[in-house]
Image (cartoon, rainbow, N blue to C red):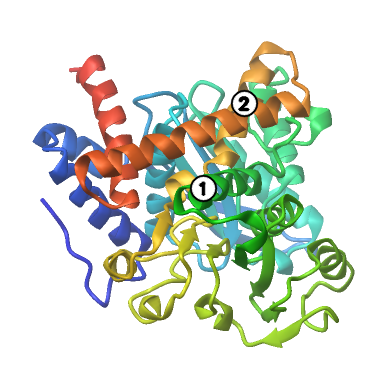
Amino acid sequence: MATSVTPETEVNPWASQEARFDIAARKLNLDDGVWKVLRMPTREITLHIPVQMDDGRIEVFTGYRVQHSVARGPGKGGIRYAPDVTLDEVRALASWMTWKCAVVNIPFGGAKGGIIVDPKLLSLSELERMTRRYTAELVEFIGPERDVPAPDVNTNEQVMAWIMDTYSMHVRHTETAVVTGKPLDLGGSRGRREATGRGCMLVCDQAIRRLGLERERTRVIVQGFGNVGSNSAHLLYRAGYKVIGVDEYDGGIYNAKGLDVPALMEYRLANGTLQGFPGGEQRPKQQLLTEDCEILLPAATENQITSHNAARIRAKIVCEGANGPTTAAADEILQEQGIFIIPDILANAGGVTVSYFEWVQDRQGYFWKESEVNEQLQHVMETSFHDVVAYAERHNVNNRIAAYMLAIDRVAFSIKLRGIYA
């Protein structure tokens, strides 16, 4: 039943997920039947979405929604709009959501969605029509008790507002809990926008404490400067870490003495790029991945650390802010180098944790102060970090396999308690 990753499949995120799942399942001596249940998604939906464009012509976009597991609760996972979305990518992301929710022990399963589109080529009204049609096609499959979408790559609070409104129109009442990551005025949660970055900061704090490092002497390089990367960099900077590099799709900025992250964020907002920022040296794209530092925080997309560059990674800690930034083939190389990995299904789980808090608040009709959200998030992230590290030590495995084992064990336990409906 096990699978292996070949050079041809290394950058296929579903193949990487399968490889890690198989290792963890084998070490758990997972029951063959449960292995089969968890190895494949519960449901895969492919949609062909007709949209009338502003000039009157009709375009058809392909979209997906994959629900990997709902054994522990409703499906949970983002929706991304990108020209390179594939079904295998969405499958992998959905399964990672299952494991992520189980690692932080919140009562959700895993799901993910995507549309093959370059949103930069659509007007705002075209984007809205595409989003609403996609939502309408999924109405019977999503909902507060079924599957709760959220923002992901190239989607945001406005897209979530359109989804919430469309769903509400179909069910004939306002249903704020159908999505998370909404605007505050429509039932969003305080602290949600910064949650993934804050979660990364919290687990970095635990990792440096474990390795005997101090914040002020800990150099950080962040790859990606979207929501996760920028908030991670900003929160780490405010906490006293020395952020020496930020890498983006069009190149990086480096300053060995430390970057002024708030100024860098303002520059990016004003100019749409990091290039030309006066507070650092420009570097070619991806060069900073192999620069000397204590913490490398990849927060862009999948497949950034591969078998081709893993041996040149010089960080002491890799904190995976993105989903799947390290391929399965690179795992062993990083382990041989003694790099402390904070795997994605733990490191970036702050986002789904506060999404859970948002879902709870919507269903209660009572909203928390931001300090309460952050306090609860800190408790979840720190507890989960120690759970994973303790599991790794107990089973003599690396942190990634420990996180998978812990998650699979929890989901499998739920399946066994529920039984198989016949």
Res. 273 mark: none
Position of residue 116 in the picture relative to residue 91 (left or right): right
Residue at 37% of width from left, 45% of height from top?
95
| x, y percent for residue 107 | 45, 24
Residue 150 visible in this rendered orientation of the protein: yes
Picture quadrant where residue 237 is located: bottom right
Quadrant of the rendered structure where residue 328 is? bottom left
Name the one closer to the observer, 79 or 300.
Answer: 300
Q: Residue at x 74, y 64 (%)?
A: 122
Is disc 2 placed on a helix, strand or loop? helix
Amino acid type at mark 2: Gln
Q: Residues within 10 Å of mark 1 (few under 14, many from 20)?
A: few
Nearer the N terminus, badge 2 or badge 1? 1
Point out the frontmost of discs 2 and 1: 1
Question: x and y percent of residue 27 in the render?
Answer: 15, 44
Relative vertical location of residue 367 with respect to residue 151 in this rendering, above or below: above
Q: Looking at the picture, tell me which residue is in the foreground, 162 or 201.
A: 201
Q: Report the Cα–Cα distance between label 2 and label 1.
A: 21 Å
Q: Position of residue 181 (x, y in %)?
A: 68, 38
State whether residue 89 is above or below residue 369: below
The answer to whether one can see residue 170 in this image is no
Q: Secondary structure at mark 1?
A: helix
Which residue position is annotated with label 2? 376
Q: Which residue is mark 1?
A: 209
Give the amino acid type for the residue marked by disc 1 in the picture.
Answer: Arg
Q: Residues within 10 Å of mark 2 (few under 14, many from 20)?
A: some
- Horizontal side of 75 relative to 115 (left or right) equals left
Q: Residue at x 50, y 62 (%)?
A: 85
Check contact, mark 2 vs mark 1: CB within 8 A: no
Query: How many numbered dots are placed on residues in this image?
Result: 2
